[in-house]
Image (cartoon, grey):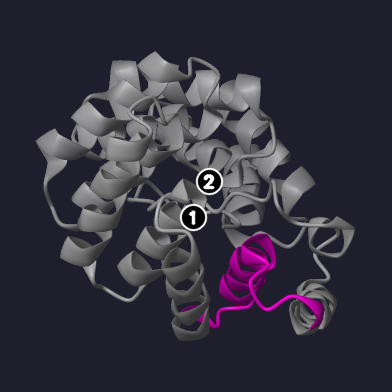
Amino acid sequence: FFFQAEDGIRDKLVTGVQTCALPILAATLNFQGAIESYQSALKQNPQYVEAIVSTGIALAALGRTEESVTQYEAALKLKPDMTIALQNLAVSVASLGRFDEAVGHLQAALKLDPNSASAYNNLGGVYWRQGKITEGIAQFRKAIQLDPESADAYRNLGILLLSQGQAAEGVSLLENAVRINPDLADAHSNLGVYYMAQRKNDLAAREFNELLRLDPQNALAKESLARLIRR
């Protein structure tokens, strides 16, 4: 999945779409072209399971979630132990509000790969969307334990803890997230909102300028920087 800056501190379901199977077309965000490429490959070999999953990823990126579900389910019929298909299926059904189903797919993925940081990260996101905050926090912590360089897990746990009033740890986690991946827009926006509320103007300006670097039309960043100038 592809992350966008969020206005303020709010929850963020990490979708966990993995792009390792995607050829260059999808890597350059030409998702429709990628789909056409996969369909051509599948005409040659209808059981090319990687192409089926990659089609699902591209469809999900285009917002065609129901169609992505169909692709992942087709892939799993051919290869039931394909963890990338299970995870992406979980992400898609979660985005459709089918949270219990998503949990089941992620738990199945973890049975196959108990050390999958991305599966724990996604499971944390689903629990969060269900309002199961304690469970969500535990899954994000497990993801970080397994992959100390997982910017997504740091970001998600940081935003969740901020939303629960645990500001000190939340901010530290978000700072780690942007250290690992400076292009996490919603981490910058949440840091900016927090620092602005704390009247740490220089730090807030830093974060909102980073947000503008990623999204030059971002209204939150523009409005916040204008307010900081007036202080």
Residue annotated with mark 1: 6
Looking at the picture, does residue 143 appear above or below residue 18?
above
- Range drawn in magenta: 44-65
Give neighbour class at mark 1: few <14, some 14-19, many 20+ (Cα, 10 Å): some
Quadrant for the N terminus in the image: bottom right
Q: Secondary structure at mark 2?
A: helix
Q: Which circle's residue, 2 or 1, is located before the other in the chain?
A: 1
- Image spot of residue 67 (x, y percent): 51, 84
Position of 23 compared to 190: left or right?
right
Taking the magenta stretch, the answer to whether it contains residue 221 is no
Identified at 46% across, 81% down, the residue is: 70
Mark linked to residue 186: 2
Residue 121 seen in this snapshot = yes
The one nearer the camera, 62 or 54, is 54
- Identify the amino acid type marked 2: Asp
Identified at 59% across, 39% down, the residue is: 228
Residue 196 seen in this snapshot = no
Q: Secondary structure at mark 1?
A: loop
Position of 79 compared to 217: left or right?
left
- Image spot of residue 183 (x, y percent): 69, 38
Give neighbour class at mark 2: few <14, some 14-19, many 20+ (Cα, 10 Å): many
Looking at the picture, does residue 128 appear above or below residue 210?
below
